[in-house]
């Protein structure tokens, strides 16, 4: 067996519309084709690839995503991104608390924040492409976010 790529992640939620809006309005994904399943949900696309699937939580079941449990299982979703300035503006306009740090010896800028379900999202930006250096980088700290 040879893995070629990550196909998608699935988030079960009882906050379907809020979660969909968050990943569309804040993260920048787009709603796309989803097969006609019996239950409500969304497939959210990056280009031609549906990378985030949203499905309804079982109202009688235990939650599958627990913010306090990060680090004990799935810790975060990591995505490469571009346009750090616009991203920070969007986060601020949507009152999203985030952490921004340098990683990889200054090669990457990482931005961490939580979706409405407590799923941590990491956006990684190539520092050089964003014009960020060790000298001009301004970190943003937020308790409980990051790796």
Image (spheres, rainbow, N blue to C red):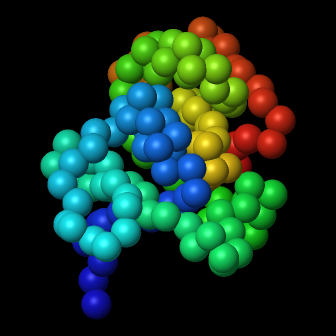
Direction top: furthest residue: 136
On the question of residue 118 being in view, the answer is yes
Q: Position of residue 23 (x, y in %)?
A: 44, 40
As rendered, which of 36 and 46 lies closer to the eye?
36
Residue 90 vertical position relative to residue 67 in the rendered view, above or below: above
Residue 139 vertical position relative to residue 40 in the rendered view, above or below: above
**Quarter holding residue 133:** top right
Relative side of 142 to 81, left or right: right
The N terminus is located in which quarter? bottom left
Residue sitting at 70 percent across and 43 percent down?
146
Residue sitting at 75 percent across and 69 percent down?
72
Q: Position of residue 71 (x, y in %)?
A: 74, 63
Q: How many marks?
A: 0
Direction bottom: furthest residue: 1
As rendered, which of 88 and 52 lies closer to the eye?
52
Relative side of 30 to 26, left or right: left
Residue sitting at 43 percent across and 15 percent down?
86
Residue sitting at 57 percent across and 73 percent down?
58
């Amino acid at each position: 067996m040879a893995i070629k790529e990550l196909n998608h992640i699935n988030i079960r939620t009882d906050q379907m519309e809020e979660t969909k809006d968050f990943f569309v309005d804040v993260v920048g994904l787009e709603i796309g084709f989803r097969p006609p399943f019996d239950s409500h949900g969304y497939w959210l696309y990056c280009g031609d690839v549906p990378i985030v699937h949203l499905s309804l939580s079982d109202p009688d079941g235990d939650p599958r995503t627990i913010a306090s449990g990060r680090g004990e299982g799935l810790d975060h979703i990591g995505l490469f991104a571009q346009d750090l300035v616009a991203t920070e503006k969007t986060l601020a306009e949507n009152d999203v608390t985030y952490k921004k740090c340098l990683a990889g010896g200054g090669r990457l800028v990482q931005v961490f924040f939580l979706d409405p379900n407590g799923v941590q999202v990491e956006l990684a930006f190539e520092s050089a492409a964003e014009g960020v250096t060790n000298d001009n980088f301004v970190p943003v700290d937020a308790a409980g976010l990051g790796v």
